[in-house]
Image: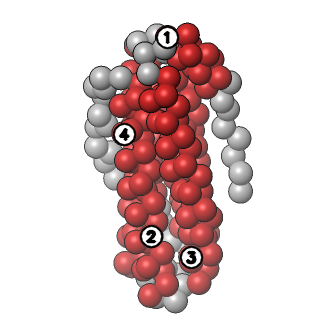
Amino acid sequence: MLDKELLDALNDQMNYEFYAAHAYMAMAAYCDYCSYDGFANFYIQQAKEERFHGQKIYAYINDRGEKAVFSDLDAPKVDFSSILETFEDGLKQERNVTKRFYDLSEIANRQKDYATVSFLNWFLDEQVEEESMFETHIDYLKRIGDDSNALYLYEKDLAQRTFTPEN
């Protein structure tokens, strides 16, 4: 059994992961609308990854004999001024996710729920990769600037991205 505080926090994080997927789909929709298919693919794959994270938490809650509880999702931001803005917003979202996992880890450590501490370590490692990836994309987009040929090539590269779940 999980302590109520920890269970509530895990359910909240599960729902936030599904919200993050929702937000990335909104970014994909903006990219598709602007005919940036490669960038849209990047965000669609990112949304798949966030849903996988939500499902991973869902399974953990159930494996611990508890009930996963779903809540309403807020509407994500849908208006962006540029591709760069979508990546900057994505980085902010990932930094928020990292903070949320730190907070969850603090609760689990305080409660000496070492199984949950171990479970959360996977997410903490994942967040290092997520933040680094967004920072790199932002650096590249700033370097590209208004060079439409470079942007085209970069977009073609992102069109190849796929998501393969890891355990």
Q: For the residues labelled 4 and 3, say whether their Cβ atoms are less than 8 Å apart.
A: no
Chain-order first, disc 3 or disc 2: 2
Q: Mark 1 sits on what residue?
A: 148
Q: Position of residue 81 (x, y in %)?
A: 30, 23
Mark 3 against mark 2, which lies toward the viewer?
2
Q: Amino acid at mark 3?
A: Thr
Q: Residue visible at 42% across and 80% down?
A: 107
- Is residue 161 left or right of 104 when viewed as pictured? right
The CA span between labels 4 and 1 is 22 Å
- Is residue 63 left or right of 164 when viewed as pictured? left
Element on which disc 3 rests: helix
Please identify the quarter of the rendering in which residue 19 is found.
Answer: top left
Q: Mark 4 sits on what residue?
A: 89
Q: Which mark is residue 159?
A: none
Please identify the quarter of the rendering in which residue 164 is found.
Answer: top right
- Is residue 133 left or right of 79 when viewed as pictured? right
Chain-order first, disc 4 or disc 1: 4
Mark 4 against mark 3, which lies toward the viewer?
4
Element on which disc 1 rests: helix
Q: Residue visible at 44% across and 87% down?
A: 110
Q: Position of residue 109 (x, y in %)?
A: 49, 84
Mark 2 against mark 1, which lies toward the viewer?
1
The CA span between labels 1 and 3 is 47 Å
Q: Mark 2 sits on what residue?
A: 102
The CA span between labels 2 and 4 is 20 Å
Element on which disc 2 rests: helix
Element on which disc 4 rests: helix
Q: For the residues labelled 3 and 2, say whether their Cβ atoms are less than 8 Å apart.
A: no
Q: Give the quadrant of the C terminus.
A: bottom right
